Image (tube, rainbow, N blue to C red):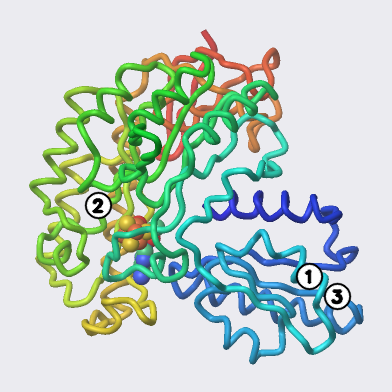
Amino acid sequence: MNVNDSEVILAVLDKGGYAQTENIEEADTILINTCSIRDNAEQRIWGRLDQFQVYRKQKDNLVVGIVGCMAERLKNKLLDSHKVDLVAGPDSYRSIGNLLEDIKPDKPKINVMLSHEETYADITPVRLDKKGVSAFISIMRGCNNVCTYCVVPFTRGTERSRDPYSIVNEAKNLWERGYKEVSLLGQNVDSYHWKKDGENIDFADLLEMVAQIDPDLRVRYSTSHPKDISDKLIYTMAKYDNICKHIHLPVQSGSDNMLKKMRRRYDVAWYMERVNKIKEVMPECSLTTDIIAGFCGESEEDHQGTLKVMSDVAYDFAYMFQYSERPGTLAARHYKDDISPEVKGRRLSEIIALQSELSLKNNKADIGKIFRVLVEGKSKKDENALCGRASNNKMCVFIDNLHKAGDYVDVRVIDCSSATLICERI
Ligand code: 5AD
Ligand code: SF4
């Protein structure tokens, strides 16, 4: 999501006559795109801001700006810190050019207005991935779910879906420019909905429209919400070979108590029913997840529930976090952050250890299978090897000096680690 926001900002600045530089010492303007989802993300940004003060001392007219979620959440604190000249929230990127022009010494500029409509539909992002193989397309913004731990609805505002035709055009344009893969992005893609002039397009319809651009254009998406993922979507995925067989389905916890407190609006039985449906329709589909350890009041039994759901689903990969209280959220207002850092840390370690076992076991089960890999480039560890992902999103590495980024190559898995499939070309 953040990469795509940066690409939109670059497009706005490009139009305003700004040029990008790889060398920070050369820059007249430094913009930092920020995330507020966990406290450590914000702490890192404060650290970066301190570093940039050195450049500010060296260059009188250097402009330093904070854009994105942290700008939205901490506007006053940022301005009071005297470390920034610009504060722009996630819905005000169009105005960044004008704001930059008006900045005067000691007169920072700010725009943190959230919008009910802004989707940046008409802005063609400047792609940051220089390999030209894979691109992100934002299909919606904001979120209406208000999970109690989550700051996103406060920083990114209410949910709005982007015009499907602008999405398809963007994907077509990328395909014509040689891109081979697009990832459709939204906080909760299953609630994508476009209604206009009698037309009613949901996420499954949109996915199908993008998949039909060309059978060799791979389509991925993220993120699904377990309460909303529909049979129609699962069947649409199954129908098209070029829709990648991977679903990121954040479970967050394997305890009904915790899920209720998190306001996720499903229970473990519902989640498992959805997982079983996916496995029944697409046995080869990989499943990944997000997990939070140590949410408010989490008992040892709740934690065991999380380990159990992980084993039952047998995820291929997981993003795993300790609960981090975010000011202003429902959880911060109503529940005590009462699990000690030691217990949170221990539970997270157990979750990480289990996931690494599951990933290794799943990868071992892939040995002997044949996958079609979209080459991303040379392997970092071996000059003579290429790397790329299979449809199920697993990273494959294989010796090859014939192909290049953007090629499809069929490979057989011969060995693995918990993170990578070692393959041979067939
Ligand atoms: N603490 C820890 N993890 C969080 N996430 C969201 N908010 C928090 C929080 N306050 C995690 C969730 C979400 C992912 C993007 O970040 O697992 O799915
Ligand atoms: Fe946050 Fe929940 Fe929305 Fe995801 S669905 S962005 S966790 S509020």
| Ligand 1 quadrant in view | bottom left
- Pointer 1 residue Cβ closer than 8 Å to ligand 2: no
Measured along the vertical axis of the image, is residue 145 above or below residue 281?
below
Q: Is residue 124 visible?
A: yes
**10 Å crowding of disc 3: few (<14), some (14-19), many (20+):** some
Disc 3 designates what residue?
A: 62
In percent of the image, x 27 and y 84: which residue is there?
333
Measured along the vertical axis of the image, is residue 67 above or below residue 379?
below
Question: Which quarter of the figure has residue 150?
Answer: bottom left
- Side of 157 relative to 1 (left or right): left
In percent of the image, x 71 and y 76: which residue is there?
86
Pick whichever, 169 or 47, lies toward us.
169
Pick whichever, 190 or 298, lies toward us.
190
The residue lying furthest to the front in this view is 197
Q: Which element is circle 2 on?
A: loop
Q: Which element is circle 3 on?
A: loop
- Side of 134 relative to 206 (left or right): right
**Residue at mark 3 to residue at mark 1: CA–CA distance:** 11 Å
- Side of 83 relative to 275 (left or right): right
Q: Amino acid at mark 1?
A: Leu
Q: Which element is circle 1 on?
A: helix
Q: Is residue 321 visible?
A: no
Disc 1 designates what residue?
A: 100
Find residue 152 and report its horizontal and vertical position in percent: 41, 65
**Residue at mark 1 to residue at mark 2: CA–CA distance:** 41 Å
Callout 1–callout 2 Cβ contact below 8 Å: no
Find residue 392 and report its horizontal and vertical position in percent: 39, 28
Disc 2 designates what residue?
A: 251
**Residue at mark 3 to residue at mark 2: CA–CA distance:** 44 Å
3 or 1: tag closer to the N-terminus? 3
1 or 2: tag closer to the N-terminus? 1
